[in-house]
Amino acid sequence: MRALTALVSAIVLVALGFWSDAQEPPPDSFEAKLEAIDIEVRKQETSAEKLEDRYLALLEGDLTPEQRGLVYVHIIDIGRYCRVSGDVQEAYALEALSYPLAAVDAVTMHAARAGILRGRYSDWRGERYAVGRRRILDAALAGLKLALDSGAPSQPVALPGIGKMGRDRPTEEQIRRHATEVAERREAERLQRLWGLRRGMSQTCAEIYSRPPVAPEELRARASEVLEDYPEAVQDIMDKLEEILKRRRGE
């Protein structure tokens, strides 16, 4: 609630500034430059190497630690559109996590690293795989704990609507009401993303331990250690594992 109140206050100040003819952020700001590269990434018309270089060039500026972390978070996103090696993505995910990040971004980096490691060890078998999957599990559980600490819900979140404000100069009360609606929507979107990350990482934990050698006891023990304050999340993982195993047995 405190975070939502702060967000409402910030949005109100921005909105009041806007209606007082405040200028937009300059096009050469960090945010504008980052968004420009993000657009190029989505267009898929530039090589991954050139996009990577453009992101890294941002680090030559006078950035805050938070902004530096964001650069690496955004570099990871290249892999959704262009071929980028797992080693490169893992290095950047770890680098991003060395900076102060918003909770959703930090959880995303842990999830990305778990996915990278899962691909790396996908061809391993037997006891070799048992060693590799412990690394996957550690990454997934680290992200899952952070997601839970940040309020990740166990069920999807309904996204509230945002009413329109007229083109004419609104009253301060109208601006505050609109700001509250925007803040509530942003918070719901944040929780929805955390829910998706929580669900995905819980599924990852179950799936990697459903492969031979199946070891539910090891999974429960490690999950219980990391998620000691969230027994319901541990049980959710174990339930998912049992569902997978039942399907395989044809039950």
Image: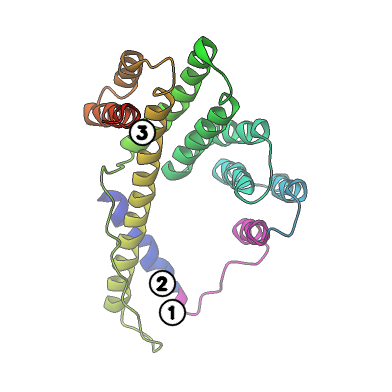
**Residue drawn where x is 57% and y is 37% of the image:** 96
Q: Answer yes or no: do the residues labelled 2 and 3 have beta carbons within 8 Å?
A: no
**Residue drawn where x is 73% and y is 60% of the image:** 45
Give the labeled residue for mark 1: 19
Quadrant of residue 9 within the rendered picture: bottom left
Q: Position of residue 202 (x, y in %)?
A: 36, 33
Q: Earlier in the sequence, mark 3 or mark 1?
A: 1
List the single residue furthest toward the front.
Answer: 250
Element marked by disc 1 = helix
Give the labeled residue for mark 2: 15
Q: Earlier in the sequence, mark 2 or mark 3?
A: 2
Residue type highlighted by circle 2: Ala
**Residue drawn where x is 22% and y is 26% of the image:** 231
Work out how far the residue at label 3 is from the one at label 1, CA to CA, in angstroms: 45 Å
* Region of the chain picked out in magenta, as a range: 18-43
Q: Is residue 33 magenta?
A: yes
For this rendering, which residue is in front, 48 or 99? 48
Residue type highlighted by circle 3: Ser
Q: Answer yes or no: do the residues labelled 2 and 1 have beta carbons within 8 Å?
A: yes
Quadrant of residue 172 within the rendered picture: bottom left
List the single residue furthest toward the left.
Answer: 232
Element marked by disc 3 = helix
How would you rate the neighbour count of disc 3 (Cα within 10 Å): few for under 14, some for 14-19, many for 20 or more? many
Give the labeled residue for mark 3: 202
Residue type highlighted by circle 1: Trp
